[in-house]
Amino acid sequence: MKIPIYSGDDQPEAAQEPGPAFEVPKDASEAMVDPVVAPATAEPAAADVLVQELEAALAQKTQEHETTREQLLRLMADFDNYRKRTTRQHEEARQYATADLVIALLPGLDNLQRALNAAGQDLAPSSARIAEGVSMVLRQLKEALGKVGVREVQTQGLTFDPTRHEAVDIVSVPATDDGLIVEEVQHGYLLHERLLRPAKVVVGRADRDATPGGS
């Protein structure tokens, strides 16, 4: 039996054909065909870190906003108090700007009042005319002072008040009149609510040693 001998280029076609390719069975599932993918864990971790950083930055900015807001509210309150205080001081300065002038005029008022009292005690016709003229001047002067807030301290029938009255004498009175003003010696004056000069008065005092119903 002869065995055929072939050179490299003279191999039969069957020998040169490649072997059958790998075929996927028709009934194989898609899971068998899909390539295996490794789980991506790096990207979600980076996203969580970014969210945490943004939350921390937001919390810091929120705290800074609240701090600035509180500082602004305090500043506004301080400014409002300053404005009110300045307005009050300005109003007080305006109201009491004439205090020194009024105090300087008070002795003149006292002298006019004394002249009026003296003229009223003289029954001569000339004294009556003088009293009328002095009374008119005194009335006009008091009206002018009243327009700037000057008024007399009330005394008649009132209880002695050391904040507005000055006791120059004390007289004995019944128990029902104890502590009451009996007589006004000199007028006192107020400028708005500020005392310019206390009224000089005589105060009644009940006899503490008297025993009601005693023998």
Image (cartoon, rainbow, N blue to C red):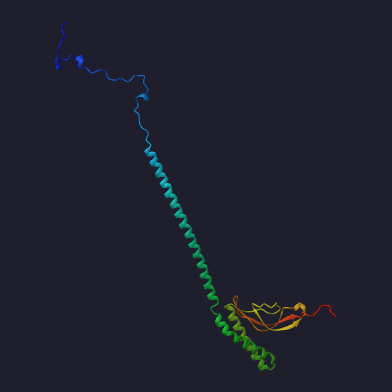
Left or right: 21 with respect to 108? left
Residue 118 placement, left or right of 176: left
Measured as percent of width and height from the top left, residue 96 is found at: 55, 77
Asked whether 103 or 151 is in front, the reply is 103
Q: Quadrant of the N terminus?
A: top left
Left-right relation of 11 to 75: left
Residue 124: quarter of image? bottom right
Q: In terms of image quadrants, where is residue 198? A: bottom right
Left or right? Give the position of 136 relative to 43. right
Q: Is residue 80 above or below residue 184?
A: above
Residue depicted at x 52% and y 69%: 85
> How many marks can you see?
0
Closest to the observer, 161 or 113? 161
Snapshot quadrant of residue 52: top left
Q: Quadrant of the C terminus?
A: bottom right
What residue sits 39% from the left and 41% below the top? 47
Query: 200 above or below 31?
Result: below
45, above or below 185, in the image:
above
In the displayed orientation, state which residue is furthest to the top: 1
Residue 135 location, x and y as percent?
64, 86
Q: Nearer the viewer, residue 45 or 162?
A: 45
Instruction: Find residue 208 and report its horizontal and vertical position in percent.
Output: 77, 79
Q: Nearer the viewer, residue 130 or 92?
A: 92
